[in-house]
Image (spheres, rainbow, N blue to C red):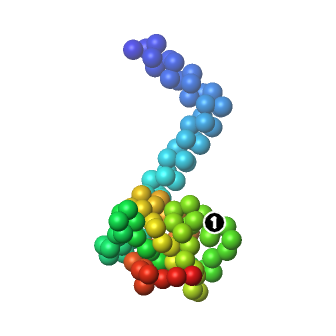
Amino acid sequence: MSTLRSILTSVVRMPALRRIGVVVLLVLAWQVWLSVQAVGKVAPGVGDHPDQRGRFSVDVVLDFAPERYHILELQKHGRVAGTSDNTVHLRSVSPAGVDALAREYWIERIDPASSPNRRP
């Protein structure tokens, strides 16, 4: 038991390992925070009317006007059908895509599409 204690003490005293430990803890804390804040972002009714492939349309609401970066990131999860003010209209979004979108810190909320058959 004393050898294990001495090994742990020597590891904790190594500055490089302490820094790695701090970075690992920060990354874990960031991931936990993303998961916690994602819970309230998806509005009731999202995914109620899926198509034949199980995909549906959503409106992604941001706190700001979307820029090119945001549109490109949203395209990873569905097809952009247009924008209006701070809202990006996405089609063909899977349930996993909604989960991934909810984890993005810059997205305010995800609502059911105002018009499921919206065309750009």
The secondary structure type at the circle numbered 1 is helix
Tag 1 residue: 72
Closer-to-camera residue (53/17)? 53
Residue 72 percent location from the top left of the image:
63, 65
At label 1, counting other C-alpha atoms closer than 10 Å, the crowd grade (few under 14, some 14-19, many 20 or more) is few
Residue 114 picture location, percent across and down: 42, 84
Q: Residue at x 40, y 65 (%)?
A: 55
Q: Residue 105: image x %, image y %? A: 53, 65
Q: Residue furthest front?
A: 52
Residue 93: x and y in percent read 45, 66
* Residue 4 in which image quadrant: top left
Q: In this rendering, would 81 be left or right of 14? A: left
Does 70 sit left or right of 116 as displayed? right
Q: Is residue 32 left or right of residue 71?
A: left
- Which is more toward the observer, 44 or 112? 112
Res 83 seen here: yes
What is the three-letter code of the residue carrying label 1? Leu
How many numbered callouts?
Answer: 1
**54 above or below 24?**
below
Residue under the image location 46 percent in, 13 percent down:
3
